[in-house]
Amino acid sequence: MNIVVCVKQVPDTATERKLRSDDKTLDRDAADGVINELCEYAVEEALRLKEAHGGEVTVLTMGPDKASDTIRKALAMGADKAVHLVDDALHGSDALGTSHALAQALKKISFDLVVLGSESTDARTGVLAAMLAERLGVPQLTFANQVQIDKGAISIQRVTDYGYDRVEASLPAVVSVVEKINEPRYPSFKGIMAAKKKPVEKLGVAEAEVDASQVGLAGSWSEVVDFAAAPPRAAGTVVKDEGDGGVKAADFLASKKFV
Amino acid sequence: MSEILVLVEHVEGQVKKVTLELLTLARKLGAPSAVWTGAGYSPEAAAKLAEYGAEKIYVADSAEVSDYVVAPKAELLAHLVAEKSPSVVLVAATAEAKEIAGRLAIKIDSGVLTDVVGIEDGLVADQSIFGGGVNVRSRVTKGTPIIAVRPNSTPVEAAAGAGTEEQVSFTVSEAAKSARIVERVKQEKGARPELTEAAVVVSGGRGVGSADKFSIIEELADSLGAAVGASRAATDAGWYPHQFQVGQTGKTVSPQLYIAAGISGAIQHRAGMQTAKTIVAINKDPEAPIFELADFGVVGDLHEVIPQLTQEVTKRK
Ligand SMILES: Cc1cc2nc3c(=O)[nH]c(=O)nc-3n(C[C@H](O)[C@H](O)[C@H](O)COP(=O)(O)OP(=O)(O)OC[C@H]3O[C@@H](n4cnc5c(N)ncnc54)[C@H](O)[C@@H]3O)c2cc1C
Ligand SMILES: Cc1cc2nc3c(=O)[nH]c(=O)nc-3n(C[C@H](O)[C@H](O)[C@H](O)COP(=O)(O)OP(=O)(O)OC[C@H]3O[C@@H](n4cnc5c(N)ncnc54)[C@H](O)[C@@H]3O)c2cc1C
């Protein structure tokens, strides 16, 4: 089974994240780039499915040169090889543009299953998996906290507000995972060393047959008009409980008309 | 006046509050048309939609539309966009509605904006990003704007609309039937409001100490008509079900009031709640980072403070 796992590099949430003042895109130099948390779960799930059913795991990332660190991390966890979509023309793509580029790359890589995280920590649109399913014309099995594959059939538990739905489809398919699906492994020293030798294929817009008019800032369907730092929260009141902490909290809630 | 499509969210026929928020918002932009999908449509539901301004109600209540993951709903909206030429499509910024919006965007070749907290003249959308740290104004530049609006960002106001009903004749394509929902498992916790759209959320963390002790969190929540949330430490420990986790890898909530009890305020937790209008924290450690966000904080043992607070709230009601 050929499994492709889509991995995004995002700025570390522990550092201050910014937009660039010039073109209003994410400032990737301001913060350390790390693998998007839910993408680690996606890599782990891909590795487990490979261990159970055989095959190969390919990492697919769209991002600048610096994103190769994130690719290495996924390879160190155990993925077999990687495709890095990298081209200045892709800079500033919105969700439609990104999904177009990833879908074109996926058409070049043969896949039975595409695995994504259900959301990134920077843009947090949570639409990529659904968009890829739409573009590739394959079943969408998203927000999975459990995945089962039996020959050509796949079933997942899709997390909902009320619990979960059991969803069935046949391969090829697109899956996105939530955090409760597994516990991602740490790369071993051996894994880190091996990752250095694993093949990473770089694809530009032309090689991936991406329509350049649909990607990048100019090709996007949406634009940032302007932005500003949110005003900081005003400092609050903190009291020590001296047997009346609950009453004081109730007074505060009453002053705000919550009771 | 231009027509605005509003995708209705409902639980077994009960219209959700976020839909009333969307209708209120849509009235400022044009004439709202509510789009009903799936079973459960009733005269009561229609009356509710009209009460908040729906001029038209498009009804697609065949089971087919909701028996498969997302694709049929996107297809239905694309059909309506082609037929009615609305100026905007509004959906709630919930996990599923965002997915519907994403697929629709591709079908109708239009831009999509997510996690929007307000819409200004000229269809410029306000987005709150990086956990509330940065405010962005953005707009769709190609096609019919599709805007996913975060629950609790618009105060609801009733203003009657005609509520003219129109059955949508539409057949789901075979292609949209590829991921079938074969079972729906409900793990509801009583009759509390839904976490992502509740006006008040009371969350417990590791400081709660055990699954049993979550009852004191639930009792406070019930006294305030609130939803219950939990930190990852609490869900990982199995003290509270996973779907109630608030944070970067859990739910994002933006309520009027968020009460954090026994939660330290780790960055991943804050990412899911720091856009709450008012934050109250109860924690025995005066150095806990949650106090940096809190409008009001009590340094103390939650096992003492919370029951007293519940009692006071109940008494003052
Ligand atoms: C703050 C901010 C807000 C934005 N808001 C919007 C908006 O409202 N509308 C819009 O159209 N665009 C928006 N964008 C642009 C958006 O970030 C990009 O289109 C992005 O590449 C995809 O969106 P996402 O990260 O939200 O994906 P999500 O759907 O949240 O990510 C889910 C999964 O998709 C996969 N994935 C996502 N990106 C990549 C990638 N580059 N390479 C490999 N796999 C990937 C990963 O598996 C990830 O876990 C925004 C960007 C920023 C920085
Ligand atoms: C990939 C990843 C994703 C994550 N996603 C999330 C997420 O979505 N949501 C989330 O919440 N976390 C998330 N986390 C975890 C996060 O980093 C913290 O570990 C978690 O939020 C801690 O939960 P807590 O505040 O309940 O526990 P702790 O940090 O242990 O804090 C417990 C607090 O309770 C206080 N306390 C103890 N006893 C009492 C008492 N009797 N009375 C009053 N106060 C008391 C303590 O002083 C302490 O401040 C994520 C982490 C990672 C690595």
Image (spheres, coloured by chain):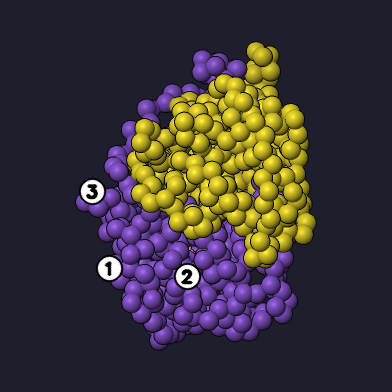
Q: Splitting the image into four quadrants, where does ligand 1 fall?
A: bottom left
> Any idea which chain is the yellow one in this picture?
B
Chain of the residue on which disc 2 is drawn:
A
Residue projecting furthest to the left: A22
Do the residues indicated by labels 1 and 3 lie within the same chain of the protein? yes
Image location of residue B65, percent across then percent down: 69, 52
* Badge 2 element: helix
Q: Mark 2: which amino acid? A: Ala
Q: Where is residue B305 in the image (x, y as percent from the top left)?
A: 61, 26
Circle nearer the viewer, 1 or 3: 1
For the image, the number of numbered tags is 3
Q: Quadrant of the C terminus of chain B?
A: top right
| Residue A259 percent location from the top left of the image | 60, 17
Gap in angstroms between the C-alphas marked 1 and 3: 18 Å
- For this rendering, which residue is in front, B307 or B166? B166
Percent of width and height locating residue A90: 33, 65
Q: What element carries label 1?
A: helix
Please tell me which residue is depicted at 33% across the width and 60% down the height of the picture: A219
Q: Distance between the residues labelled 2 and 1?
A: 18 Å
Q: Colour of chain A?
A: purple
Q: Would you name the residue on which mark 1 appears?
A: A88
The local crowd at label 3, few if under 14, some if 14 to 19, many if 20 or more residues have their Cα within 10 Å, is few
Among the two numbered marks 3 and 2 on one chain, the one whose residue lies closer to the N terminus = 3
Q: Residues within 10 Å of mark 2 (few under 14, many from 20)?
A: many
Residue bearing mark 3: A21
Disc 3 secondary structure class: loop
The residue carrying mark 2 is A103
Towards the viewer: A158 or B89: B89
Q: Which residue lies furthest to the top in this view?
A: B316
Nearest-to-viewer mark from 3 and 2: 2
Q: What residue type is labelled 3?
A: Ser
Badge 2 or badge 1: first in the primary sequence: 1
